[in-house]
Every structure is written in C-alpha cells, then in structure tokens.
Image (spheres, helix red, strand yellow):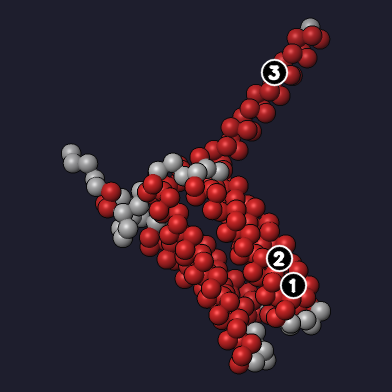
Amino acid sequence: MSVPTNSDRAGDQFLGFDFHQLVLDARSSRLGVTFAQIAWFHLLIFGFCEGLSLRGDRSAAHFLPLWALDVAFAVVVVRPRIALMVTLDSRRATWVWFRVGITFAILCLTSASMNAITGFEIDWFKISWSMLGTFGFATLAWIFHLAFLIPAVQMSITALLIAAHPTHAYAIFGASWFLTLNGLGFLLEKTHLIHRVGWHSLRRDRVIFKRRSQEV
C-alpha cells in the first residue's frame, strides 16, 4: 500500500499543509488560550461599542481607536504563539491563517469607512462585517479543513440577526465572535482540560478514600 503524499490529505488540497500536525503544534503552543483571550477582549471592546451606539454616539474618534485596539491586541498575543510552533510548516500555516485575519480586519475598516462616506442612514457595514467573516472562515475551510464551514455558517446567521435587530448589532457581532473563538480555543485546549479534570478527580478520590480509611 502506498503512503499518501502530503497533498493527498484531507484539507490540504491547495497549499500542502499538514492539518493534523498544525493542530498538534497549536495545542503545544497553547494557541487555544490565546483564542480565549482574544474572545474576551473582543467581547469587552464591542460591549463598549454597543454602549456608545445605544447612546447615539457615532463619532469615528471614539469607535476607530476601539477597533484598532481590538486588532492590536490580537496581533500582540498571537505573534508569540506562532513563534512557539514546533515545525516550520505549522508556523507557515499559522501565518496564512493570521494573514487571512488581517485581511478581514482591513476590509472591515474599509466597509465602515465607505458607510461613513456614503452616509449613516443605514449601518450596512455591520452586516458586511459578518459576511466578511463568512468569507474568511470559508477561505480557511478550503485551505485547511472543512470544519471551518461551521463558523462560516454561524457568521451568515449573525448577519441575518444583525439585519433583524440593527439596534444591538455590536452586541450580536461581539457575542458571535466570542462563541466562535472560545469554541476554537476549547477544541485546541480540550486535551489539557481533560488532563486537569482527570487529575482533580483522581486527587478528590484519594482524599475521599483517605478519609474513609481513617473513619474505619
């Protein structure tokens, strides 16, 4: 039986990345923790945006620094994790992932700027952000693994929710990304979580056994 080449593996059709090795390296570098950090910070930033929006504040001087801070935080916390990747191939793959994210951020800023130029009668840029998220995750699905189509669909649903409830667009967008990033983080960190739960469970059983032995 012939051994399949790297290009024959599921999810590696285009760039030849070994997705299984990428996941292993991401777990070893604790990238899942970074996703959780970004998720919480993103939720905080968009909570502020929601508050400003409900107050009727549309000043770019308030929103742009918050959006820039959100992107800057992601860049700062992700870069060290990429450097911890074990294999060069995984580092290359993660940089591709990261660049897709940067492209997403640039397009989001562009759509918000165009909305400001054409007028804010309708805040259509908030819907476009979610659709750009769908495109970004679909791109990752075709490059890495079809499982990324799940958050792609979630972002499409997010766009529909924002269209139906525009008053709470920032809250919906922030919560959707919070769930997505924490979900990815959990999947990467579940091995560590299982070990921790198993260790605490074993420790608890030892304590109970010791107490029962003393009572006898």
Kindly check if marks 1 and 3 are in contact, taking CB atoms under 8 A apart as contact: no
Q: CA distance from mark 3 to mark 2?
A: 44 Å
What residue is disc 3 on?
206
- Amino acid carrying mark 1 in the image: Glu
Q: Which residue matches tag 1? A: 50
* Amino acid type of the residue tagged 3 in the rendering: Arg
Circle 2/circle 1 CB separation < 8 Å: no
Is residue 132 found left or right of 15 in the rendered image? right
Q: Nearer the viewer, residue 40 or 9?
A: 40
* Left or right of residue 190, residue 10 in this image: left
**Distance from Cα at disc 1 to Cα at disc 3:** 49 Å
Q: State left or right for residue 141 relative to residue 31.
A: left
Question: Which residue was labeled with disc 2?
Answer: 45
For residue 72, which quarter of the picture? bottom right
Disc nearest the viewer among 1 and 3: 1
Write the residue at 74% across / 72% down.
50
Decide: is 186 above or below 72: above
Q: Position of residue 174 (x, y in %)?
A: 66, 66
Query: Which residue is outermost to the top?
Result: 216
Image point 64% across, 87% down: which residue? 116
Q: Left or right: where does residue 151 sit relative to residue 58?
A: left
The residue mark sitting in front, 2 or 1, is 2
Distance between mark 2 and mark 1 Cα atoms? 9 Å
Q: Can the viewer see residue 49 in this picture?
A: yes
The single residue placed furthest to the left in the displayed view is 1
Tag 2 or tag 3, which sits nearer the N-term? 2
Which residue is at 67% across, 89% downward? 120
Task: Tell me the SS state at disc 3.
Answer: helix
Percent x, y of residue 28: 50, 40
Q: Badge 2 local density, few (<14 within 10 Å), some, or many (20+)? A: some
Counting from the top left corner in percent of width and height, residue 29 is at 52, 43
Q: Amino acid at mark 2?
A: Ile
